[in-house]
Image (tube, rainbow, N blue to C red):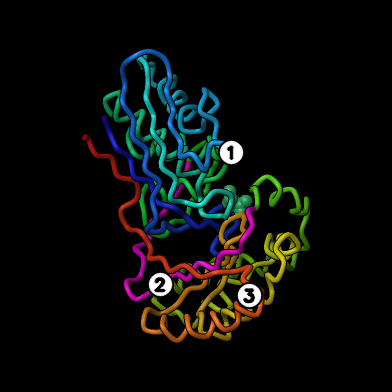
Amino acid sequence: MIRVSVPATSANLGPGFDCLGLAIDMYNIIEVEEGGDGLCIEVPKEDRSIIPTDETNLIYTSMATLFDEVGYKFNGLSIRQTNNIPIAMGLGSSAACIVGGIVAANYIAGNPLDIQDLIELSANLDGHPDNVLPALVGGITVGCLHEKKVYYSRLEPPTDVSLALIMPNFELLTKRSRAVLPKEIPFEDGVFNVGRAALLIASIIDGNMDNLAVAMEDRLHEPYRKELIPHFDDVVDMAKESGAKGVFLSGAGPVIVSVLKKEDRQSFEENINISLNKLDGAWSLKWADMNREGVIVEEL
Ligand code: HSE
């Protein structure tokens, strides 16, 4: 039996739509055993209405894709899925299933694929590399999918930074959140985002957190998606007023991420809680650290 621990992820980081991402210390656990007859998938009781336990399960379909790719004929499979990453909140729960399935299948098949192959297979399954890449390699990642290949860089996360995940009491499916995006954008919005994405990466490398307020601004997706997220602008303003250095919509949403200096955590928490309480309990705060290791496989 193997156990695969896959971190949550946050994509886009503001201006880096479909290319920037980071890994978070919060894990889905997937236990897999080859053998026996057929397919047996166990998911937590509370997730049974939304996660299939047949051959359409995303972990299983991802495993089957890798087995096909490398020509491995598997016997029966038992998969047990424990979801600590909330579903449809913009924290990479689907990417975690894809990465977990791909990594588990590669291990079972005797590790025929290297990390670059795993990244490309996962990114092509997800459609973009911004969640799967940090889930695989940890840290902060920049990745572009070009003709099915992934070109990427990984940055080491700063040690003095915490993430405040501001979570609403509703879910938002990525499909719905992508459906509101425009087919075309004004040229000046492209210029706006290119400058900010470049400034963001340079500022992470330099450790210049004072740039983040501007460097995490976006005009490609947040202005459209916020229509699906009641009080989005209020929460962003509250986070900034409470001391966040940068604020962005996590992936397709609806979680909003605030980037803080660790030393500012306590005052941020006190202030934001007072503000969030004015929104009738619809939003709550969860602290997270960035993950450095990426996915981990253990033999039990
Ligand atoms: N970059 C993706 C998006 C992440 O914003 O739609 C979610 O899959």
Q: Is residue 167 magenta?
A: yes
Q: Which mark is residue 286?
A: none
According to the picture, the residue beneath numbered tag 1 turns out to be: 50
**Label 2 SS:** strand
Name the residue at 50% across, 27% down: 61
Q: Is residue 253 left or right of residue 182?
A: left
- Up-down: is 237 above or below 91? below
* Amino acid at circle 1: Ile
Residue 235: numbered disc: 3
Mark 1 CB near ligand 1 (8 Å cut): no
Q: Earlier in the sequence, mark 3 or mark 2?
A: 2
Q: Which residue is mark 2?
A: 162
In the rendered image, residue 285, in percent from the top left (x then y), is placed at 51, 70
Residue at 38% of width from left, 66% of height from top? 289
Q: Label 3's element? A: helix
| Quarter of the rendering containing residue 119 | top left
Disc 2 beta carbon < 8 A from ligand 1? no
